[in-house]
């Protein structure tokens, strides 16, 4: 039996187990299982792997995408640059354990945004500073966009939510929410921006996928914005995870 799973905390919002369980049944993939492992500390990872000798791969979600790196033996170049991993490949060779780290969020982000890329799409506003935010910043830079990252705390590299003025939003083409605001079960929460400054010239992208239509996206759609839900990214990064786990090139 090959076992895969998801680590993070909490995991009540996640669709990953359902996605992979249905994939195994639909594609008649035998002797595979996918489980949720809700651990509140990355320091429980060695014990988790020890207690699950059939574990071949893990997805990593909030809040562990950055702290997990201390347990990764081999890091993909994108992981090194981003400073976060959301896919672990576990290899056991001659009794020795080695953990490889990758970031499939990059694939999911690019696949989600690419249909909207045009010569007019130049400036992005990224809400949040966690591991997903870093993956978004990395991906959008690769796509040629200029980015500004918004945090609750101002610093030389970051702007504050109070800095999101009408003039800033007028120059912004796409706004990406990388925070858990709006995620099940707290579905009424949303990033603190002035939604009345949004219009049909803006694209809103929410990495939250449960619910698919977050309050952030609803309020943008009401004002004429184009929207990108998190489901496209979820499916794309999950497919990339499966490729990483089952391709000897990784």
Image: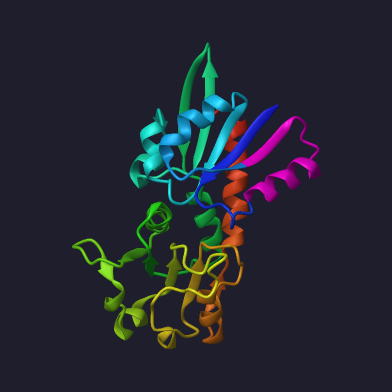
Q: Nearer the viewer, residue 87 or 12?
A: 12
The question of residue 30 being in magenta is answered with yes
Question: Which part of the image, by quadrant, shows the N terminus?
Answer: top right
Quarter of the image for residue 92 reads: top right
Q: Residue at x 72, y 44 (%)?
A: 21
Counting from the top left corner in percent of width and height, residue 47 is at 49, 29
Q: Residue at x 48, y 50 (%)?
A: 106
**Residue 92 sits above or below residue 208 on the image:** above
Q: Which color scheme is applied?
A: rainbow
Counting from the top left corner in percent of width and height, residue 84 is at 39, 45
Quarter of the image for residue 166 reads: bottom left
Q: Is residue 15 left or right of residue 58?
A: right
Q: Is residue 32 left or right of residue 126?
A: right
For the question of whether residue 222 can be seen, the reply is yes
Q: Nearer the viewer, residue 96 or 138?
A: 96
Q: Residue at x 59, y 55 (%)?
A: 12
């Amino acid at each position: 039996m090959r076992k895969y799973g998801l680590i993070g905390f909490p995991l009540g919002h996640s669709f990953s187990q359902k996605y992979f369980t249905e994939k195994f049944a639909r594609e008649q993939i035998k002797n595979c299982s996918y489980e949720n492992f809700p651990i509140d500390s990355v320091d429980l990872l060695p014990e988790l792997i020890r207690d699950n000798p059939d574990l071949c791969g893990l997805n990593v979600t909030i809040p562990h995408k950055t702290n997990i790196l201390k347990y990764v033996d081999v890091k993909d170049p994108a992981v090194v640059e981003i400073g976060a991993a959301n896919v672990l490949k576990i290899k056991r060779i001659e009794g020795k354990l080695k953990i490889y780290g990758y970031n499939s969020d990059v694939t999911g982000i690019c696949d989600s945004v690419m249909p909207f890329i045009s010569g007019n799409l130049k400036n992005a506003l990224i809400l949040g500073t966690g591991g997903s935010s870093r993956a978004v910043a990395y991906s959008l830079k690769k796509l040629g966009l200029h980015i500004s990252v918004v945090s609750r705390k101002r610093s030389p590299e970051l702007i504050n939510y109070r800095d999101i003025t009408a003039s800033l939003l007028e120059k912004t083409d796409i706004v990406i929410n990388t925070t858990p605001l709006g995620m099940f079960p707290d579905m009424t929460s949303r990033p603190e921006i002035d939604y009345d400054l949004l219009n049909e010239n803006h694209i809103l992208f929410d990495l939250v996928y449960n619910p698919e239509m977050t309050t952030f996206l609803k309020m943008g759609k009401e004002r004429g914005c184009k929207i990108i839900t998190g489901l496209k990214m979820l499916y794309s990064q999950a497919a990339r995870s499966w490729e990483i786990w089952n391709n000897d090139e990784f």
